[in-house]
Image: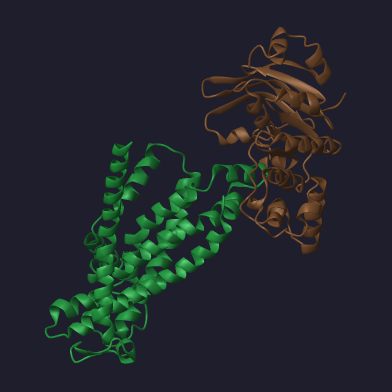
Amino acid sequence: MSFKIITKNLNLWYGGFHALKNINSGFEANRITAIIGPSGCGKSTMLRVFNRMNDLIDGVRTQGEVLIDRVNILDSGVDLVALRKKVGMVFQRPNPFPLSIYENIIFGEKIHGEHIIRDKLDEIVEKSLKDVLLWDELKDKLNEPALRLSLEQKQRLCIARLIAIRPDVLLMDEPCSTLDPQATARVEELMRELKNKYTIIIVTHNMQQAARVSDDTGFMLLGELVEFGRTDQVFKAPLDQRTEDYITGRYG
Amino acid sequence: MRNSHRTQNIAFFFLLLATLLIIIPVGLIVVVIIQKGLPAINWQFVSDIPRQGMRTGGIFPAIVGTFYLVSGAILFALPIGLLAAIYLSEYAKENLLTRIIKLAIVNLAGVPSVVYGLFGLALFVVFLKFGASILAGSLTLGIMILPVIITTSREALESVPQSFREVSLSLGASKWQTIRHIVLPNAIPGILTGTILGLGRAAGETAPILFTVAAFYLPRLPKSIFDQAMALPYHLYVISTQVPNVDEKIRYGTAFVLLTLVLFMNLVAIIIRTKFRKKKKW
């Protein structure tokens, strides 16, 4: 079996706080992996290891290996720009820039592109918006401010902005937590479509969502990866007592 | 219930009173200056050199001088101040040293302007041998407004939501690209507010230019930045206290022109700010 992302004995400390404890896991390409667990269990921290966003926080120390396409991204020599182009992130709160819809999507191209051709930009915008199923709604108002969109549209736009830079991996940090149930269902539908092209890892504290949308599930508790396996198995026949307790709602 | 209602009314009364107390003096100053100064304003007054010991003629050299000095001060202070603000808000780590630096900058804003004047005299006029010149005066004014520009710019930069920086970095932008494309454009309105404040202060101060550039009476235009120049605030001081029998009309006229000049320069900044504010919404 070939894994897109592998973690080997991954440990992480915030100062003196041991936030990730000896995590060994493998994430397969073209599947959706959900990471579930109670607040503060380290699931968002783990997600932020994969694009090295934890580097922004003072006093973070990481140990172990994280291999993405067999390259250890924790090496000090890793090109963070290249890594983040490859491993993109969708945040909890939809956060488009205070720019137009068009400018939001071409942001990555503006940053990374050597010379920019208008036609090519138009093409990128159209394709990215089509991929997130927003094109028909927004094609006539590409120059309107992105902040005027609805929450769901904003979150879709953020996904479009991300896939415009053609990443391999999509990290999603509770992407639906600000959305209503209908919007959540539509974004989940979108995730199912996107997994044909990307490796998706989603952090969620909504267990129904994990059960609905994911192929694999990892359960984290107090910085430990307690259980990791096929979603069906994790939810129906968990191997660890703590997983069962959490899934059946005994704590968390 | 009735009691809390009465408390609210009393509070409201005092809040209104405080606001009026601020507005009334400002309004009065403007009204008096317009009332007494406007009659002096004509084409000759703003375009001619002072004549007969500054008792007639115009104030054109002083207008030009002030315009040069303020432009020079902004040209010097805005880039340096902005770069310092970017460093402090985006790059510097929060530690004792940066806290001391920030505190020092805030305190510099409170240093009396005459001290800046003496400093300018010692450093630019004497030590660097610029002499009493537009260059020395501009630099002195620039240093005086630096703290205002740094502090307001830093606040403007820091008010840009952290999440914008995060997303930008997560999309593979470098730190500088994030600052250049995301942070700065969103901070421009606040930076311009600082510039406006600095501009007004630079135009109005007398003490910093007293020893560094201002000419008592110089009925011609400066030819280079190494020339002395007249300036409106100093000219106003001179014709109000040093030259006897100057018509009140001319004094208030000069004040009116100074006020208008500052207003005009502010207007430019305000227009740019409004243009940028329209784009910014979060």
For residue A60, what is the image quadrant? Answer: top right
Foreground pick, B5 / A57: B5
Residue A204, percent from left and from top: 69, 27
Residue A47 showing in the rendered view: yes
Q: How is the image coloured?
A: by chain
Can you say whether B177 is above or below A32 in the image?
below
Foreground pick, A184 / B6: B6
Foreground pick, B196 / B280: B280
Can you say whether B155 is above or below A119 in the image?
above
Residue B248, percent from left and from top: 18, 82
Residue B208, percent from left and from top: 26, 66
The residue positioned 61% from the left and 16% from the top of the image is A222
Chain B: colour as depicted: green
Single out the residue that lies furthest toward the top. Answer: A241
Can you say whether B145 is above or below B138 in the image?
above
The residue positioned 66% from the left and 30% from the top of the image is A49
Q: Is residue B262 left or right of residue A96?
A: left
Chain A: colour as depicted: brown
Q: Is residue A88 left or right of residue B183?
A: right
Foreground pick, B34 / B163: B34
The residue positioned 37% from the left and 58% from the top of the image is B146
For residue A117, what is the image quadrant? Answer: bottom right
Single out the residue that lies furthest toward the front. Answer: B2
Q: Is residue B72 left or right of residue B59?
A: right
